[in-house]
Amino acid sequence: MTLETKHSLFLLIFFFLIIGLTTIGQSNPLFFYLMLYIAMGEAFNLMYGYTGYLPFGNIGFFGIGAYVVGILAFLYGIRPPISILIGAMVSMIFSLILYPTLKLKGIYFAICSFLISEAVAIAIRAAPFEITGGPTGISLVDCYNPLYSYYLMLLVMASILIIVHVIDKTEKGLALKAIKENVLIAEMSGVNSNKYKLLAWIINTTVVGICGGLTAWHIAYVNYEIAVSPVISLNSIFLPIIGGTGTVVGPVLGAFFYIPMGTIGLQFSNFFLFIYGVVVLLTVTFLGEGLLPAVQRHIIPALKKHSGE
Amino acid sequence: MSAIVSAIVSGVLIGCFYTIVGLGISLIYGVMKVTNFAHGDFLMLGGYIAFLLYASFNLNPFLSIPIAMATLFIIGLAVYEAVVRNLMKTRNPEESSLIALYGMSISLSAFYFILCGADYRSIPYTLPVSSISILGTKFLTTWVLGSALSIAIALGLFQFLHRTYTGKAIRAVISNVDEARCSGIDVNQVCRLAFAIGLAVAGVAGAMLPLFQQVINPAGGIQYTVLAFMVACIGGLNNPLGVTIGGLFVGVCQSISNFILPGYMWPLVLALIAIIILSIRPMGLLYR
Amino acid sequence: MLKCVDITKRFGGLCALDSVSLELKDGEILGLVGPNGAGKTTLLNIISGFLKPDSGYVMVDGMRADRLRRFEICKKLKINRTYQIPQPLTNLSLLDNVLLATVFGNEEGQVDREYAREFSIRLLEKVGLENKLHVRSDELNAAERKFLDLARALATRPRVLLLDEIVAGLSKFETNFIIGLLRELVTKEKISVLLVEHVMDFVVTVCDRVVILHQGKKIAEGKPKEVLRHKQVVEIYLGSEKVE
C-alpha cells in the first residue's frame, strides 16, 4: 500500500491542526518548532534538492525577519502579523540584492552565503542599541499570542508544502532539477535558467524570513542569539539533509528528528549536536541523497519482495 | 616606525601563520577535490592537544607542536580511510564533503564542549625576552617566533613537494588525476598521504595558536575553517605557493582593518573581501 | 537559412576559427569535416550558443544570434544539437529528459501535459528507446545515450539540427538507422542538418554538401565526392608526396 504524497501531506496538516487545539500543543513549543523545521527544511530543499544550491546562509534571512518584527514593535508599535508581512518584504528585497551570488557555483555559493549570514549577524550586533535593543534584545510580551502564531505557522508550513509539492509534480520541478544537474543542457532544452533560479531563491528566502518573524512573535522575544541562532541554522540545514532532499516528504521526515533534541535535548544539547553531526556525516557519505530516498530505493523493494508481491 | 607600518608588519607576521592555516585545506582540495569543512576543528584539536599536555604534564608548549603534528597525521590517515575515501565516491564530492565534514565539524565542536567545557584556554609562554625590537617598534617575541616557525614549516612543505618523489607525485595528482594514474602513481595512497599532511599542518597551526594570543575554545573551529578557505581561495585552490600570498594578504588586511575600524568589524570586512573575490575569481587569484 | 558570417574565435594565443563563413541551406545536410583541432566543434559550440565568437555572427532566417541567451537560441532560432560526449540528465528518467525539452522547447504553458507526454514517448520510439522509458539515464549504454541526446534535441522541434560526431562508435546497423532517420527528418520534418564527422563513409553517403576546415580556416566546400578528391584535402589527411 503506497500512501500518495498528497494524502500524507493532508494528514500532516490535519495532525498539526488538531494538536493546536489540545493542551499539550498549546503549552509545549515543540510542535511549533516542528512546523518551523518542516517549513525551513522545505525551503532549503527547494534550493538544494531541486535547484542545486546550498543556502548555508538562510539564517541571515531568518534574523532579518525576526528583527524587523522586533524593531517595528519596539520603535513604532506595529504588531504582528502585519509586521511579519513587512519582514517578508524586507527579506525579499535583500534576496533580490543578493541574487547575483547565484552566479557562484556549488561550494563557493555555500561559503559566500554563510559569510553573508555572518555579516548580517555582525551588522545586527554593531547596530545602535536604541534600534535593536542591544544584547538584552526586544521583548514582545504585549503581542504574545502563542495560539495565533501557531496557526499562522501552520498556514506558512502548509503553503510551502503545497508549493514544493506542486513544483515537484509539474514541469517546474523538472526544470529546477535539470538546472541542478547541468545548466547548459537545461538551457538547450529551452529552460530560462535565470528565471527559475530566481523563483526558487525568492520563495526560499521569503519563507525563511517569514519564519524568523513568526518565531520572534511566538516566543515574544528577539535578541542576537535567537535571531541568528546557530542551533536553528544547523537544524535548518541538517534536518532536511538527514531526511532527504529532492522529494517533498524527505524534509518532513527529517524535521521529526528534531523531537529528541526539542524534548530531552534541551539540557544535553551538546550531546545531541554531536549525534547530529555524526548522523549527517554518515548519511551524506553512505546514503547520498538522504534517509528517505535510501529507504525508497532499498527498503521498500525488499519489503515488497518479502511480502511476495 | 610609524603606526600604520607597524600595523602592516604585524599583519605580515600573523599572515605567515594564516598561510599555514590555509595550506592544509588547499592541499586537500587540490589533491582530492574534497572541501574539508572541519579543518578549523582539527586545527582546534591541535590546540587542545597542546593545552592538555601543558595542563597535565606541564610540557613545554614548543614540544607539543611536533606531538600535535604526529597525532593529527595519524588521525588524518584514519579519517581518510573511514570517511574521505567514501566521500570521494559520491556524485559530487566537493559538495558532499562540504556537508559531511560540516557535520563532522559540529560533532567535534560538541565533543570539545563535552570534554573540556566552554572555557577559553590558552598557554602562557615564558621566554627570555617578551618583545623584540624591529626598526624601533616592539613586537611580541611569540609573534615573531610563531611567524618564523610558520615560514619554516611552509618551506619544509614546499621542499617536500618539489624535491621528493612523493611530493612530486602529490603535485602530479593536483595537476591531473587521470594522467597521474596512467603514470603509475597510486592515487589512493597519494590522497591518503595528502589528507594526513593537511591535517598535520592544521594540528601544527592549532598548537601554535597560543603564540599569537588566539584562544583555544570548542566553537572556535569554524572561524579558522572560513579563514583557511579565504586564504586558499585568494591564493588559488590548487596552488600551494599562492596560499602564501593569500595568507599575507589576509593578515595585512586584518591589521589595517583593526587599525582603522573597531576590532569586531574585522569579520564583516573579511566577509566583504571574500564576497568580492569569490565573485570575481572563485578559484583563486593565482589559480593555474 | 543558417548563415555563419566571418566567425573568428581565439583561445588565448590559439586561433581556433579564422573568419569562417558558411551557409546551411533549407533542407540540406551539410557535413563539416577536417582533422582534429580544425575548429569543427568550436564552430558548433558557437552556432548553438555555448560560446560567443570574438567577431562575426550567426544568423538564422535574418535573425542574429548575438544578443540571444542560450535558451532563446533553442526556442527562437530553433537550433538544437547533440554532443560528442552525450550529456544525459542523470537525475531524471529517460522520459523526463525528453519531456523537459518538449515542454520548454516549445512555448511553455501552451503545451498540454498529456500531449507532451505522448509526443515525448513517440520521439523515444522514433529513436528506438521505447523500452527504456523509466530507466535512469545513467544506466544507458553509449549508443543509447546518443539516441537520447537526439530525441531531446528533436523534442524542441528545431529547424536546424547540429550533430557532433553522432555515428562515432556506432555499429553498422545503428549507423544505417541514423542515416534513415536523418533522411526522414529532412524530407518530412523539414529540418536542416549540420554534422561534424570523422567517419567518411557516412559523410559521403548522407551529406548533400561538405565543408572542410583546417587549422581554423575553411579550405574547401562542395559536393562530397568532389571535395574529398581536392588536392589540398588529400594532403591534409594523408600528407604530401614531398619528403622534407
Image (cartoon, coloured by chain):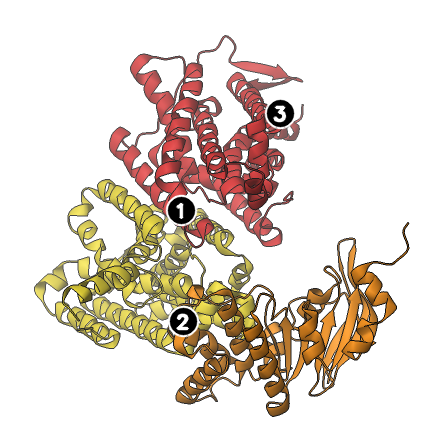
Chain colours: A yellow, B red, C orange
- Which residue lies most toward the top here? B128
Q: Are marks 1 and 3 in contact (CB under 8 Å)?
A: no
Q: Work out whether residue B212 or residue A226 is closer to the camera in this orientation and state it.
A: B212
The residue under the point 34% across, 12% down is B58
Q: Quadrant of the C terminus of chain B?
A: top right
Are callouts 2 and 3 both on one chain? no
Quarter assignment of residue B180: top right
Crowd rating for badge 3 (residues with CA inside 10 Å; few <14, some 14–19, many 20+): few
Residue A114 picture location, percent across and down = 44, 51
The residue under the point 44% across, 31% down is B196
Instruction: Confirm whether residue A141 shows in the render.
Output: no
**Could you tell whether B7 is left or right of B108 in the image?**
right
Q: Is residue B60 above or below residue B219?
A: above
**Could you tell whether C34 is left or right of A292 in the image?**
right
Residue C145 picture location, percent across and down = 50, 69
* Residue C93 - label: 2
Question: Dot 3: what SS?
Answer: helix
* Residue B126 - label: none
Q: Work out whether residue B123 or residue A13 is closer to the camera in this orientation and state it.
A: A13
What is the chain identity of the residue bearing mark 3?
A: B
* Residue B87 - label: 1
Q: Work out whether residue B133 or residue A230 is closer to the camera in this orientation and state it.
A: A230
What is the chain identity of the residue bearing mark 1?
A: B
Q: Quadrant of the N terminus of chain B?
A: top right
The amino acid type, in three-letter code, at marker 3 is Arg
* Residue B163 - label: 3
Are callouts 1 and 3 both on one chain? yes
**Could you tell whether C37 is left or right of B29 in the image?**
right
The Cα–Cα distance between marks 1 and 2, rounded to whole angstroms, is: 25 Å
What is the chain identity of the residue bearing mark 2?
A: C
